[in-house]
Image (cartoon, rainbow, N blue to C red):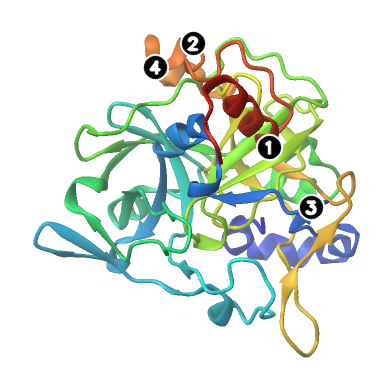
């Protein structure tokens, strides 16, 4: 997930350019773990219903009771190879986020860095492929589109921390934002966070968001690589630019463990020809950066929305989204 901070901190890159040769790029760790909304188990879809895509206001146009979304063909607009996954899907969002309060969204700080960015952003629920064989709708009901009213809290890595990232990840973050919407959200539930966070290397995770601005994807079969930094952790999530702001969940509890904000390169860009995702072995590559939810937990409303795991995840111990499907099938007779 190529960091949008590259654009914000370009002067610093001139200083550290020699180090860039040592950064390992990524797109996919091992097998591609991304799935569309219609492909994941019901309890994961319930979480996904509270995940949002962030759009530039000029890409979201109101026409009566609906908003039209301006999108482009993913593969063509990115000069990708024809066999790249999701080649023909539409793209348009620039970041991801999640509902954590009745009118509060959590995302990455670099997604909405100031009030000007807030005022020019639309928050959209439901940009997803709901049924196999269909595509994501190019319009959303007016009730599914919100404005950014103000920034509650935002934090970005300093230039010094960003430069230090090229030497080691310990000083790369954190990076997060909490924003107030222009009205209370209806039809979607704030998601619970882990207020008693005790992370360990190897803990299994999944993320939900909009890689490269695509319709919602669930990136599963991931685990924590490094918990030594104080304010963030690193994981082998199959995430891209556009996933910035994505909530990262425990695969065991369904609680939010953090917010994604950075990672390696997304695509291999050869001198000639088309681009494709950078694929590395599961244990290789740079890893993705996730701000710990404990850093901003005190700013997120508590109560039922923030103190216990979702009912669907309680007492379930699953190793991956595939295992979750098997578990649901066995217990409830649901086929996927």
Image coords of residue 253 (percent x, y): 60, 19
Depicted 32 relative to depicted 203: above or below: below
Give the alpha-carbon distance from disc 3 to disc 2, as whole Å: 32 Å
Place residue 236 in its image quadrant.
top right
Labels 4 and 3: the sequence-earlier one: 3
Give the alpha-carbon distance from disc 3 to disc 1, as whole Å: 13 Å
At numbered mark 3, what does the secondary structure look like: helix, strand or loop?
loop
Image coords of residue 276 (percent x, y): 73, 73
Depicted 10 relative to depicted 123: above or below: below
Labels 3 and 1: the sequence-earlier one: 3
Give the residue at mark 3: 31
At numbered mark 4, what does the secondary structure look like: helix, strand or loop?
helix
Place residue 92 in its image quadrant.
bottom left
Residue at 52% x, 32% y is 334
Q: Quadrant of the N terminus?
A: bottom right
Label 3 neighbour load within 10 Å: few <14, some 14-19, many 20+: few
Give the residue at mark 4: 305
Image coords of residue 101 (percent x, y): 34, 25
Residue at 79% x, 35% y is 170
């Amino acid at each position: 997930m190529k960091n949008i901070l590259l654009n914000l901190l370009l002067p610093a890159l001139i200083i550290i350019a020699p180090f860039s040769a040592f950064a390992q790029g990524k797109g996919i760790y091992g097998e591609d773990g991304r799935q569309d909304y219609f492909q994941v188990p019901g309890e994961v879809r319930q979480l996904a219903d509270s995940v949002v895509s962030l759009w530039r206001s000029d890409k979201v146009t109101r026409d009566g009771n609906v908003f039209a979304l301006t999108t482009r063909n993913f593969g063509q607009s990115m000069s990708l190879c024809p066999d790249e996954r999701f080649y023909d899907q539409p793209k348009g969002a620039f970041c991801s986020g999640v509902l954590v309060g009745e009118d509060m969204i959590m995302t990455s700080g670099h997604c909405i860095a100031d009030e000007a960015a807030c005022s020019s952003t639309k928050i959209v629920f439901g940009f997803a492929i709901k049924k196999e064989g269909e595509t994501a709708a190019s319009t959303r009901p007016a009730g599914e589109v919100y404005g950014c009213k103000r920034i509650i809290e935002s934090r970005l890595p300093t230039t010094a921390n960003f430069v230090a990232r090229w030497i080691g990840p310990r000083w790369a973050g954190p990076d997060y934002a909490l924003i107030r919407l222009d009205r209370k959200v209806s039809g979607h539930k704030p998601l619970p966070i882990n207020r008693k966070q005790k992370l360990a290397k190897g803990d299994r995770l999944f993320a939900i968001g909009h890689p490269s601005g695509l319709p919602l994807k669930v990136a599963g079969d991931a685990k924590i690589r490094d918990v030594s930094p104080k304010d963030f952790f690193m994981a082998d999530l199959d995430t891209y630019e556009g996933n910035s702001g994505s909530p990262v969940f425990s695969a065991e509890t369904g609680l939010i463990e953090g917010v994604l904000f950075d990672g390696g390169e997304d695509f291999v860009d050869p001198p000639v020809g088309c681009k494709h995702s950078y694929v590395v072995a599961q244990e290789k590559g740079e890893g993705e950066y996730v701000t710990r939810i404990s850093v901003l937990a005190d700013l997120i409303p508590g109560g039922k929305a923030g103190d216990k795991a979702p009912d669907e995840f309680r007492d379930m111990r699953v190793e991956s989204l595939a295992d979750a499907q098997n578990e649901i099938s066995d217990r409830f007779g649901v086929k996927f």
